[in-house]
Amino acid sequence: MLRIENLVFDYPGHRALDDVSLELGVGSITALVGPNGAGKSTLMRVCAALDQPFSGSVYLDGLDVHEDPRGAHRRRGFLPDFFGLYDDLTVSQCLSYRAASQGVPAARRKAVVDSAAERLEIADRLHQKAGSLSRGLRQRLAIAQAVLHEPRFLTLDEPAAGLDPSARIGLSGVLRALARDGMTILVSSHILAELEDYSTHILMLKQGRVVDHAPLTTMGAVTGRRIEIRLDFARTVPELRLRLIAVAGVEVVSCGIDEAIVMSDPDPAERAGMLAAVLAAGLPLASFSPERRSLQDIYLARMKAVSERPPLRLVGPR
Ligand code: ADP
Ligand code: MG
């Protein structure tokens, strides 16, 4: 769906994206996380064909977004981190105006506006002025504007910032519904517990580089390229650690009297082999499952593991 190849982006004197390559699959919701200044907003702007990279390419459904930015704008929606609305226009006027600017023919505009308002659950506000909406409803209007031309790909830069808890829950529901309709979504946020709620993948950036990019389901237990598996036993097993170590292919991370955490390769075949070996050794296994850690734990661990590099300063011609 979205393919990024060797992307490099420089601000004067500062490299903000340093050789970023990745792919996002159709219908995925990718949580883009990283410390302030990691390059998240820059990556989103480049993917949205708003900024031209120094080198590298971004393809949206095979279309090179920097060769055909207008074509890219038709296929993508973008909610910037700071956005303005026309406060004196009504919700309906804001949406019609956006529809017109997106080239939706006049005859279809009303249908498009109604459908976007319906989708974002602001259909009952069509005649209210944008300036009188609450923060949560302004956010919905802005997203409605971004998706009204039915883009295949949507980027949202910190959409949950400043929203109250119920507006944030509403936002999670909206993003899930858009992804169910086949939209591919890239969303940045610092509210990790929420991202965990609706994201299918996580993309971690630090100092302009990809630290990790993985499905959230396996990510729950991935450290590097390995998965942690939790074993629970039906009763206490004397010398459990030694008995596990004796099973070929089991690398023990931690061990109690009736439970242990071991490392496995992400390859399911290897995991199947390990499970068979543990059973063959006669251990009273009660459950065998990937260890799930919260996104926050994973994030903090990964960010710490990747050491700080001195920032790359670019020296221009004198
Ligand atoms: P994030 O969204 O992850 O906080 P940004 O993409 O906004 O990060 O910024 C990445 C880096 O680029 C930061 O170090 C920031 O200071 C720098 N940067 C952002 N915008 C500009 C700019 N217009 N000129 C120079 N440097 C910038
Ligand atoms: Mg940002």
Image (cartoon, rainbow, N blue to C red):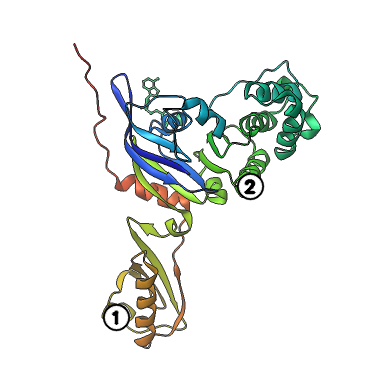
**Around disc 2, counting alpha carbons within 10 Å, would you say few (fewer than 14), some (14 to 19), or many (20 or more)?**
few
- Observer-nearest of 238 and 40: 40
- Observer-nearest of 101 and 225: 101
The residue drawn where x is 38% and y is 44% is 22
Q: Which mark is residue 181?
A: 2
Residue 212 as seen in the image, left or right of residue 249: right
**Around disc 1, counting alpha carbons within 10 Å, would you say few (fewer than 14), some (14 to 19), or many (20 or more)?**
some
**Amino acid residing under circle 2:** Asp
The residue drawn where x is 39% and y is 30% is 37
* Of callouts 1 and 2, the N-terminal one: 2
**Amino acid residing under circle 1:** Val
Q: Which mark is residue 247?
A: 1
Residue 308 as seen in the image, left or right of residue 80: left
The answer to whether residue 76 is visible is: no
x, y percentage for residue 204? 40, 43
The residue drawn where x is 64% and y is 36% is 164
x, y percentage for residue 317? 20, 14
Q: Quadrant of residue 96?
A: top right
Q: Quadrant of ligand 1?
A: top left
Identify the secondary structure beneath mark 1.
loop
The answer to whether residue 285 is visible is: yes
Query: Separation of disc 1 and disc 2 at Cα?
Result: 46 Å
Q: Is residue 238 above or below residue 289?
A: below
What is the quadrant of the C terminus in the image?
A: top left
The residue drawn where x is 76% and y is 32% is 111
Residue 179 as seen in the image, left or right of residue 43: right
- Observer-nearest of 293 and 218: 218
x, y percentage for residue 253? 32, 67
x, y percentage for residue 105? 70, 25
